[in-house]
Image (tube, helix red, strand yellow):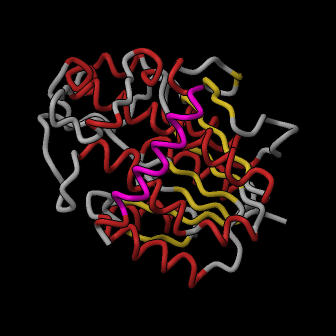
Amino acid sequence: MGKTIVITGASDGIGAAAAARLAASGHQVVVVGRSPAKTKQVAEAIDADYFVADFTELAQVRSLAAELLAEYPRIDVLANNAGGQFGARTTTVDGHEKTFQVNHLAPFLLTTLLLERLVESRASVVNTSSIGSKLYGHVDLADLDSERHYGASRAYCTSKLENVLFTKELHRRYADKGISTVAFHPGVIASNFAHEATNLMGLLYRTRLRNLLTSSQTAGGFLAFFAEGTPGRDWIPGQYYEKTRLATPAKQANDAALAKALWQRSAELVAASA
């Protein structure tokens, strides 16, 4: 029997590739994306359900969670794959730095709103992170919105470190209740995720050099591996992987006190925007 698998950021890139692969394997895939046209196109091509939500607005994340809860009595996998790297510092309608909100705060909110259903389903939560989390990421609880220090690459890498910390804390809180979590780096992907960035990374993604990067199809296979896999057999819950190999995360990722504090602060921030 196939799984019900919700994939955010699935209107293109590795999310779309994973959705197609998983649907072909007989799973019920739920495609979530920001672009109505692109999300519909991806979903219709694989005969999947779809929902549209822009993570720069937390109200849309809340609406998405409500729609998912109303539609699916069981959610076996939540793949928090949406994200991106952006250019100059901008704030969302919720008052948060865009990278922090889209890459961390929005998936944190979506996951916590779905927690009861995920526990009931003994679900897997798969978080798409990045090797940048241990190269340039640094979490400062006093400056989560990068008001004092901002750089596009730093903000992106820090948000990916926050994904790993979220994975660790979700595991600590809910592993004994049936939820299995994992974070993984899919490779440096030839997709559109950094098309708004104005730094060197953004330039790379807009030139032919992107053809030297990991293809979305290959990376989508990595995401599908974790979505289809059996926790404890195919991958170890609560851990960080690079592609499909267990890897050592950033030093801060193993700071249990930081993971707990980030969870608490994130909960406060999303509650304030309700």
| Magenta segment includes 264 | yes
User: Does residue 108 lie above or below 30 as drawn?
Assistant: above
The quarter holding residue 150 reads top left
Decide which of 111, 32 is in the foreground and name it.
111
Residue 250, image x, y percentages? 52, 19
Q: Is residue 97 above or below residue 108?
A: above
Q: Residue at x 78, y 59 (%)?
A: 177
At a point 64% along the width and 78% down the height, the residue shown is: 72
Between 244 and 129, the one lying in front of the other is: 129
Residue at (20, 22) in percent of width and height: 203
- Quadrant of the rendered image containing residue 133: top left
At 18% across and 56% down in the image, what residue appears? 95
Q: Main secondary structure of the magenta part?
A: helix
Q: Residue 16: x and y, percent?
A: 49, 50
Quadrant housing the C terminus: bottom left
Q: Is residue 261 magenta?
A: yes
Mark count? 0
Left or right: residue 247 compared with residue 51: right
Most distant residue in the bottom direction: 70
